Image: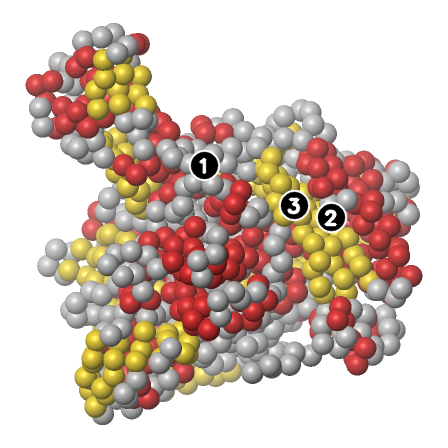
Amino acid sequence: MTTIEEHPVVTPSGIGDSPRRVEDARFLTGQAEYLADVRLPGARHMAILRSPVAHARISGVDLEPAKAMPGVRAAFTGSELAALSRPFSHLLPIPTIKPLEWSVLAVDKVRFVGEPVAVVVADSRYEAEDALEAVVVDYDELDPVVDPEAALVAGAPLLYEDWGSNEFLFVPFSSGDVEGAFASAEHVLKERFTQHRITGMPLEGHGACGQYDSAAGRLLLYASTQQPHNLRTVLADVTGLSEAKIRVVAPDMGGGFGNKQHFMREEALVAVVAMQVPFPVVWVQDRWEAFSASVHSRDQIHEVEVAYQGDGRVLGLRARIVADLGNPVLYFTGAAPALVTTGLMTGVYDIPNYAYELHCAATNKCPIGAYRGFGQPQAFFTIERVMDLVADQLGMDPVDVRRVNLIPDEPRPFVSPVGFLYDTGSFREQLDSVVDAVGYRDLRARQQDERARGRYLGVGLASMVEATAPNLHGFAGRFGGFEMAMVSVQPDGRVNVVVGTKSQGQGHETVFAQVASEVLGVAMEEIDVRSGDTGVLPYGMGTWGSRSAVMGGGAVIKAAEKIRDQMLDIAAHMLQTPRAEVTVGDGVFRAGDATLPFGAVAGAAYLHTFLLPPGTDMGLCVVASYDPGNTSPFPDESGRLNPAATYATASGVAVVEVDPNTGQVFVEDALMSHDCGRIINPMIVDGQIQGAFAQAIGAVLLEEIVYGDDGQILTSTLLDYLVPAFGNVPRIRALHRETPSALPGGFRGAGEGALIVMTAAIANAIADAVKPLGVRVTQTNLSASRVRRLLRAAGVALDPVAGMRFRGLNLPVDAS
Amino acid sequence: MRLSFSVNGDDQDLEVEPRELLLDVLRQRLDLTSVHAACEQGSCGTCTVLVDGVAVRSCLLFAIQMQGREVRTVEDLAADGELHPLQRAFSEHHALQCGFCTPAMVLSALELLEQSRAPTRPEIEHALAGNLCRCTGYTSIVDAVEAAAASLAGRP
């Protein structure tokens, strides 16, 4: 990341500048309003009783003792609420997916520790939780199945008996001549890679606050959701109310990272309960709930076979992917990231002969779903490990093997084996830029020197191509790949922009003001940007999949251009000049020497409408929709589709030192080249890169969700699940390439790339470091204790006392 | 139980239950929503407030323990609508994204800057080590505190 000195504030600011963020003031002074800060008068607090066991039949729920407790206003069982609502389902008309419906609470069975079973509403959260302890639930425990491969074996305990198995979804695919590739190849490599379970863990958890006006039949729901309009559609399904009667408001959000893009049972639960009581109901997820019963991610097993030639060229790739989905009660389906994994498995390499089998397994664990990267970190970890392993086998440099296989610069779009249309810049140039910038040859030389001294440096490379601004229809059975925005100019000339995306920290109030400013020709300071309220904008698709610049930007540009054109017509009429001679900029309409302030033209549209050209509508307000038109809502008969409006790319390198005695990994350097097309706010993009890089550090070196064999979650606090803290994250150096997309603005997605590429680069660096010790890295969980296990398994004798002196980092001494 | 304490310079006199956390009294009873709950176990630092000038976890204190003490939250920092130099430095250096950790981060930094005029980067990291951030990746926060220290000490 560049330092802030490289982002001076320029006035006036437009696209490409780094104005400081409009939203900062309220976050810094405590005036932001997050979900738990919403104060609906008379609101009562909901607490959720959750299953303490991983797999059981519910034979009885007795709420009477709870209802008698102080402060309790209401309590409901799963059966009661199921009768008052309609169930969720995955809505995917795929022949190889199992039928699945689930209600806001578990009814007949619980299938993971933390699954919601009953609710109590009381005057305070304290009293509600007191009452939970009085609820009596009879659980008839069943054997749990925790391992996804064991779950797929005949005879395993079944989560859903009517399925006859635990396989939720099966997808086969083949492209090109895979058999021929393997038959003709000089070499075949087989390997098994595992991707461990982690969780996105936004610092602010989920939450919802609902109020039902029974006289008017109107429901208001505040929810910490990345997709408020889509949530409204889902709530209409579950509650039976029309969307015309539902308003969803997503307030300020303390992070999301994909965890908040699914439509949570608990959000619908709050809505359904709110409809049964005469006061607002609020539920705020606590940290234990967030760990045990929110959204987990990654958790896949890849068994790959690679057919390759002696010069490093990969001819064919086969992958058998087992994706652990936990109890798959998530909408849109938690199978979505695994489906994306299958699409990116060939990486940035030209491997036309590609076949996969995806097996999505249900297990007695928390549901799996979206987290920044959305299945892509898994794919790139594997293919980038494959490139290094091929290099090892052939005694080639890992850079050279990659160069032999990279997707060539022509044609564009490049059609991947699964039908993705890569509209990107040069993969070769991007990789070369990173190899040069890091001083690769010198690094390798230094690595040799250090090895001779018994120190283990590792250099890890990775490249990625990312589907950004995707079409959600294929995963959700509806919704699509479009966006909406409303631009209004007020009588005084100031501008309101409402966009259907939803910031969880990405600075949209600043970024979209920059975009609108450039189109309308007025200063950013004159533009107010808002989002998240379904009562204001007809529809939106939210923020996820690195889509906001592309899709939100596209919709804002479209609406702003229409407004600008309307105002140019009015200005021309007011100036009595031909339309073609009028321009707008710096807040002024100009025709030769004649000028009109922006506000004067706006005033004419509202206050002095006799000034308008005949036949012109009053007011200045446009609601525009934007669909790039190049994404598929679902695969074709051959299983191919192009899901993304445009693609971002990155190449990265990590340099690590691994202590052979403790398994500690020190990240010495991290560098990446990132191409997100035309950058709107470089400071914000650099912030996304540094933040995503921190999550990559966490994903490899620190974070791991662990379950016991009995299905108990063992990592349910921040003392067990370690997220990066100060001192864990070095500054990543980011080089920017701007290959404009063909879409309005020339933007591509920016938010996820660093997590995708640096997860693979860090893992490769560790693998490279420990190779001489006889360790072959085929897993993503590489914390110190995990690396120690690998070292021991390779027969390395550990000397922990020597490890205390690693890099001169002695045990800390408190000087106070 | 009767609790008398000072919050952001104002005297407060409240009836509280023994088990009510300081976090909840500040948020629910005094509407100081800058204080955020994120773990309620003392492991993330998001609920940090200053008690008699010392940064503490409001989720690990009962409100009644504040008897006779002075509590300070970030609502007290911007005087007359002007951001404190530390707050300005956070914005200047893009040291916040979602803002959820930010009030606590600012208060922890404030405690450091009241003790040290020129903290080094490792000292800043050590002082703030109890505050988690999931968005920024930390380097911009250290930049901001370093810059604020210089600004407050009159250094360029």
Residue hosting label 3? A672
Across and down, in percent, residue A78 comes to 34, 72
Relative placement, left or right, of A577 versus A110 is left
- Callout 2 secondary element: strand
**Residue type indicated by callout 2:** Leu
Residue hosting label 1? A17
Pick the residue in front: A621 or A328. A621
Instruction: From this view, report whether residue B99 is shown above or below residue A229.
Output: below
Decide which of tag 3 and tag 2 comes sooner along the chain: 2
The residue depicted at 28 percent of the width and 41 percent of the height is A528
Quadrant into which the N terminus of chain B falls: bottom left
Pointer 3 chain: A
Across and down, in percent, residue A204 comes to 41, 64
Across and down, in percent, residue A152 comes to 65, 64
The residue depicted at 61 percent of the width and 60 percent of the height is A729
Q: Quadrant of residue A412?
A: top right
Q: Quadrant of residue A335?
A: bottom right
Decide which of tag 3 and tag 1 comes sooner along the chain: 1
Q: Rounded to the nearest whole Å, what is the CA distance between mark 3 and mark 1?
A: 21 Å
Circles 3 and 1 on the same subunit: yes
Q: Rounded to the nearest whole Å, what is the CA distance between mark 1 and mark 2?
A: 31 Å
Pick the residue in front: A167 or A776. A776
